[in-house]
């Protein structure tokens, strides 16, 4: 099986799993999954978030997802428990489709690490 096909199948499996768990089966999009990862990384799952906090949660998720690729490095937790990352290497210019593939791959790897999918 090609790498692209394997990623596609794993992505679909993950979207189905998360959608059934968090949105009564309505497919979650990439941004919604990134948001969920941010909430998971913060560890405060039963809390309402303001719009700016939601953006910060997505930023946390993106940093965490791209950390294994060498783009970010965890730095510290602040007094409120929010993780902070430093930029190690700037992201290369990517087309929209390339960004989407990179994020999907990073998300799939994140959930494989956590043994949610295989």
Image (spheres, grey):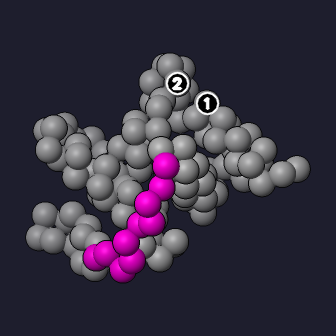
Q: Residue 32's x, y, as percent?
A: 40, 36
Going by the image, does 68 lie left or right of 7? Answer: left
Nearest to N terminus: mark 1 or mark 2: 1
Q: Residue at x 47, y 76 (%)?
A: 70
Residue 88 picture quarter: bottom left
For the record, the magenta segment spans 86-95
Q: How many marks?
A: 2
Q: Nearer the viewer, residue 3 or 98?
A: 98
Neighbor class of circle 1 (other Cα within 10 Å; few <14, some 14-19, many 20+) is: some
Query: Image quarter for residue 33?
Result: top left
Q: Main secondary structure of the magenta part?
A: loop
Q: What residue sits 11% from the left and 70% below the top?
A: 79
Q: How many other residues sit within 10 Å of disc 2, few (<14), some (14-19) or many (≥20)?
A: some
In this rendering, position of residue 110 left or right of residue 31: right
Residue at the spot of label 2: 27
Q: Where is residue 102 drawn, in percent x and y?
A: 55, 55
Circles 1 and 2 in contact, beta carbons < 8 Å: yes
Describe the element under mark 1 as helix, strand or loop: helix
Mark 1 and mark 2: span between their CA atoms?
7 Å
- Residue 75 in the image: state x and y as whole percent: 28, 79
Residue labelled with disc 1: 16
Q: From this viewpoint, is residue 17 visible?
A: no
Q: Position of residue 46 (x, y in %)?
A: 27, 41
Q: Which mark is residue 39?
A: none
Residue 93 on the magenta segment: yes
In screen coordinates, is 10 left or right of 61? right
Which residue is rendered at x = 31% and y = 49% of the image?
Answer: 58
Q: In front: 53, or 43? A: 53
């Amino acid at each position: 099986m090609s790498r692209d096909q394997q990623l596609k199948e794993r992505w679909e499996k993950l979207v189905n799993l998360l959608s059934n768990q968090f949105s009564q089966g309505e497919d979650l999009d990439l941004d919604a999954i990134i948001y969920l990862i941010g909430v998971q990384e913060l560890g405060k799952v039963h809390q309402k978030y303001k719009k700016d906090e939601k953006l910060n949660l997505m930023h946390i998720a993106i940093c965490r997802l791209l950390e294994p690729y060498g783009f970010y490095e965890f730095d510290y937790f602040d007094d409120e428990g929010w993780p902070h990352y430093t930029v190690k290497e700037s992201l290369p210019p990517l087309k929209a489709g390339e960004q989407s593939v990179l994020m999907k791959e990073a998300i799939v790897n994140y959930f494989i690490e956590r043994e949610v999918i295989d």
